[in-house]
Amino acid sequence: MNTAENGTSSAAVEPSTERAETPGTLLLPASAYTSSAQLEAERKAIFERSWIHVGDVAELKNRGDFITATIGNTPVLIIRSHDGELRGFLNVCRHRGLTLMEGQGHCEHQLKCQYHAWSYGTDGRLLGVPYREEFKANVENKNLIPIRVAVAAPLVFACLDENAPSFERWAGNLVPALERARAAEMIELHKFEYEVACNWKIGVENAMDTYHLPFLHANGDAAYIDADSAVIEEEEYGSSACTALPEAFLAILPGRDHLPEYDAVHVRMGSLFPNLVAVLFPGNLL
């Protein structure tokens, strides 16, 4: 999952913090997964205040390469500037608020708004305003609005909130885990995108739930995981479960000589709040 909070919605109601009344459980009420008002509150209170995975370094290799994403309801633009720096901006022209760029691509010289052709450098500076001598409004300090950007090996993150913790604090042990795996050197071999018709929390909760593996995936994922060996680590903004890989699986898993001894024989299933799930098998990142 990246930035989308896909989900169903019902008639708007006030966001609910009530617990379900089932004795002995901590279930959220159904409205937490179906209310459009609840979803909107979460976009503002969670997504727009968090570090969100918005793309991958492989998409931003060359100077001028850019990607776009949405954090909560806010469109953002991440670009490899012509000075080589990775920068993030609100993906909005400062003139009339039109979305500046769509999708991903390459900017040879300038970012140009389609509406009135205001143009910006890849460093966010306002460069051109057509008929500027006739434009009476003050255009000083109308550069693109920057946002925070961080990189963890192959992953690119962005954050709208200036007061959110540093990325290093937010990511916790994910960063050193990716470094030990030499994930920055990994090459994308396959990309599979799909959309699930559910609230974003259901997808995250399912990915964090290892309890179901030996039952629902008895002949699948669970066959490659020694659940009894799991070591759970809780962090401020995430959690992980490291489990040993069975010998039968390790025997067919090549190319592990570059890894530390522990990482060469374990899988790390980690979640990073709010919606990133990263699985590190020896030699690959899912």
Image: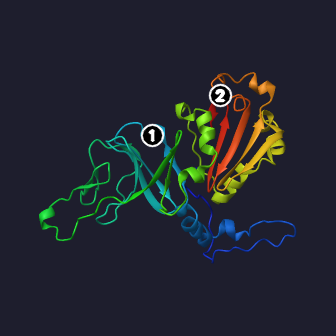
Relative to 273, does residue 191 appear above or below in the rendering? above
Quarter of the image for the C terminus: give it: top right
The residue lying furthest to the bottom in this view is 14
Disc 2 marks a residue whose amino acid type is Leu
User: Which of the two residues, 182 or 120, is positioned nearer the viewer here?
Assistant: 182
Q: Residue at x 36, y 40 (%)?
A: 84
Circle 2/circle 1 CB separation < 8 Å: no
Residue drawn at the location 49% of the way across and 48% of the way down: 150
SS at mark 1 in the image: helix
**Residue furthest left in the image:** 133
In the rendered structure, the answer to whether residue 87 lies left or right of residue 174 reads left
Residue neighbourhood size for the residue with mark 2, other residues' Cα within 10 Å, grouped as few (<14), some (14–19), many (≥20): some
Q: Earlier in the sequence, mark 2 or mark 1?
A: 1
Discs 2/1, front: 2
The secondary element bearing badge 2 is classed as loop
From the image, tell me which residue sits under label 2.
259
Q: Residue at x 64, y 60 (%)?
A: 199
Query: Crowding near pointer 1: few (<14 within 10 Å), some, many (20+)?
Result: some
Q: Which mark is residue 59?
A: 1
* Residue type at the position of mark 1: Glu
Q: Is residue 165 left or right of residue 256?
A: left
Q: Alpha carbon of mark 2 to alpha carbon of mark 1: how far?
A: 26 Å
- Residue 63 drawn above or below residue 74: above
Quarter residue 228 falls in: top right
Q: Residue at x 27, y 63 (%)?
A: 141
Which circle marks residue 204 in the picture? Answer: none
Is 272 placed above or below 105 here?
below
Horizontal and vertical percent position of residue 283? 63, 29
Instruction: Residue 155 in the image: state x and y as whole percent.
Output: 53, 43
Q: Is residue 198 visible?
A: no
Rendering colour mode: rainbow
